[in-house]
Amino acid sequence: MTRYKSWTLTDTASDVWLDSFAVANDALRLATPHDWSIRKRTLRGGLRDGVDLIEVHNGALAYSVLPTRGMGIWHGEYRGNFLGWHSPVRGPVHPRFVNLTERQGLGWLRGFDELLCRCGLACNGPPGEDAWTDKQGASHKSQVTLHGRITNLPAQLVEVRIGLDPPYEMSVIGRVEECELFGPQLVLTTTITTAPGSNRLVLHDVVENRSAAPAEMQLLYHCNVGPPFLEAGSRVVAPIAELAPMTARAAEGIDTYDTYLGPTTGYAEQVYAYDLQADAAGRTLALLYNRNADKGLALRWNHSELPCFIVWKNTAAVEDGYVTGLEPSLNYPNFKSFERQQGRVKMLPPGGRWEATWGLEVFDTKEGVGHVLTEIATLQAHAPRKIHRTPQAKFSPA
């Protein structure tokens, strides 16, 4: 069994909370040449006041975890290449400044500036009134807000763990509870892991239903990328089984669904729904790479755990948020009632759980990008892609 050393940074059940924390290779003297470190601090001033920030640096790859914002990942960097995007929102924003019901349920956007945030857990997609009938025939209605609550909930438990044996994995573990009386009792436990010198981080998420009644669950990983990976001529590639624009606006760009413009004033977002091919073990992937094919960001996940994939193109002016989203998901980001009709709302039994493991890799050489492109081409060779020119009823109601 792998040995490790751990530190508890937050544990509300035991009244533990550390305002600051630091550990580095010079303290543990692990047999690695990489100068790694993990540091925790609490931000002060402005909309970020009170946000806990855990900065992980493995000697090559760096990223900041946000326990105050649902254990999302704020910004990062890989060998001088920025990871994330420049949102008009200057975050990270403390959840107390985000009113989810504002602007008819679009208030979530006031805190949105992360490299990675989760959309869920009880719901995601656009806001509105959700109506459904339970198994006993009773009718129910509730208001749902854009992309749910999990991103704006703080972690109840936060732990740092360092492996004492090769590959000396460095993990940040957090537990976030989305619970209410007469409502969902869903608990997310995430483990975010990297290794010294690696170009990769891995997320392992477990969602548990703590209720004695069944509970619906939705989850989408909103991975948001700007320059230097996104620029005029960048491409997004994946082993496509089927693809469709989700709206009439997206259909306007179907001939260039896989390429990107430079910053474009007045650009209106385009969203595409993908059903991807996978290998015999269910593994699939997607890659965003720049015009010169020497910088790329790849996501890897299991199709059986996250069967949906979405690409959000928002190549607006830099001042308005020049960004694209690569989004592995349990569902497509439609209104919850539509996704329920399509059978894409997960139902967890009492005490039930769902889990998924997926990774993000960064490349800064043509060789690295080329290897991933070859992987995708190999998967794509198993069957031709089917590209729809208009929205399809099974992907979206448009």
Image (spheres, rainbow, N blue to C red):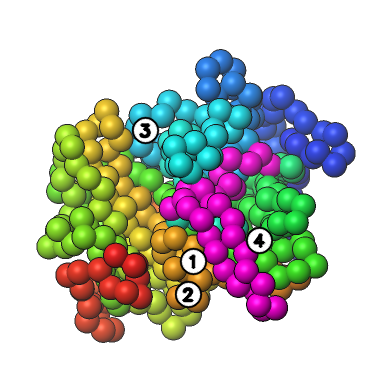
Stretch of the chain drawn in magenta: 126-155
Residue 337, which numbered label?
A: 1
The answer for how far apart the CA atoms under marks 2 and 4 are is: 22 Å
Q: Secondary structure at mark 2?
A: helix
Q: Is residue 313 visible?
A: yes
Q: Is residue 146 magenta?
A: yes
Q: Is residue 47 found left or right of 22 in the rendered image?
A: left
Residue displayed at 69% across by 25% down: 20
Q: 271 or 43, which is in the foreground?
A: 271
Under mark 1, the amino acid is Ser
Mark closest to the chain's N terminus, 4 or 1: 4
The relative height of residue 174 versus residue 206 in the rendered view (above or below) is above
Asked which secondary structure carries label 3, the reply is: loop
Q: Which of the two discs, 1 and 3, sits closer to the camera? A: 1
**Is label 1 in contact with label 2 (beta carbons under 8 Å)?**
yes
Q: Residue 87: give its label.
A: 3
The residue under the point 62% across, 69% down is 139
For residue 168, above or below residue 41: below
Q: Are marks 1 and 3 in contact (CB under 8 Å)?
A: no
Evaluate if marks 2 and 4 touch, with contact meaning CB atoms under 8 Å apart.
no
| Image location (x, y in percent) of residue 336 | 49, 63
Which residue is the extreme one toward the right?
14
Q: Residue at x 73, y 50 (%)?
A: 180
Give the mark nearer the N terminus: 3 vs 4: 3
Residue that label 4 marks: 207
The image's mark for residue 341 is: 2
Q: Gap in Å between the C-alphas at discs 2 and 3?
A: 34 Å
How packed mark 3 is, by other alpha carbons closer than 10 Å (few <14, some 14-19, many 20 or more), is some
Q: Residue 107 placed where, x, y %?
A: 48, 38
Instruction: Label 1, secondary structure: give it.
Output: helix
